[in-house]
Image (cartoon, rainbow, N blue to C red):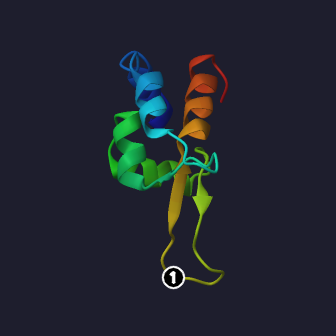
């Protein structure tokens, strides 16, 4: 069900590269800021809950900031990794 939903979204993603470039600006050290779940959802044009589902299923690249054994999961996203992930999905990779 989620895969079909993502395929439908593919048709609506013409501006993804521009959005990722805007969010992918790097600082003086060449490090891109990390995105929170809401920012990643905005870039992907999905809900935050969909992003959390993708994280839980291990289907989207993310960075865990939670200490071992933490009750709450803290995740962030690299805009360039999201872009690469999306492009791979568009090309038929799963």
Quadrant housing the N terminus:
top left
Quadrant housing the C terminus:
top right
- Which residue is at 59% across, 23% downward? 87
From the top left corner, tell me how far across and down residue 50 is, in percent.
40, 47
Q: Give the number of callouts.
A: 1
Along the viewing direction, whichever of 33 and 15 lies nearer the viewer: 33
From the top left corner, tell me how far across and down residue 19 is, in percent.
40, 30
- On screen, 18 above or below 44? above
Along the viewing direction, whichever of 25 and 70 lies nearer the viewer: 25
From the top left corner, tell me how far across and down residue 65 is, in percent.
58, 69
Q: Which residue is mark 1?
A: 71
Task: Determine whether, in the image, residue 61 is placed left or right of residue 49.
Answer: right
For mark 1, give the secondary structure.
loop
- Which residue is at 61% across, 39% downward? 81
- On screen, 70 above or below 66? below
Image quadrant in which you'd find residue 26: top right
Q: Residues within 10 Å of mark 1 (few under 14, many from 20)?
A: few
From the top left corner, tell me how far across and down residue 7 is, in percent.
46, 23
- Which residue is at 53% across, 50% downward? 77
- Which residue is at 38% across, 44% downward? 41
Task: Determine whether, in the image, residue 64 is placed left or right of residue 7.
Answer: right
Image quadrant in which you'd find residue 16: top left
């Amino acid at each position: 069900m989620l895969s079909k939903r993502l395929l439908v979204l593919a048709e609506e993603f013409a501006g993804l590269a521009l959005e990722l470039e805007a969010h992918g600006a790097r600082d003086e050290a060449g490090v891109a800021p990390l995105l929170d779940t809401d920012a990643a959802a905005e870039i992907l044009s999905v809900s935050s809950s969909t992003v959390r589902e993708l994280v839980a299923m291990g289907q989207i690249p993310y960075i865990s900031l939670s200490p071992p054994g933490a009750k709450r999961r803290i995740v962030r996203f690299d805009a360039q990794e999201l872009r690469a992930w999306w492009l791979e999905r568009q090309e038929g990779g799963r």
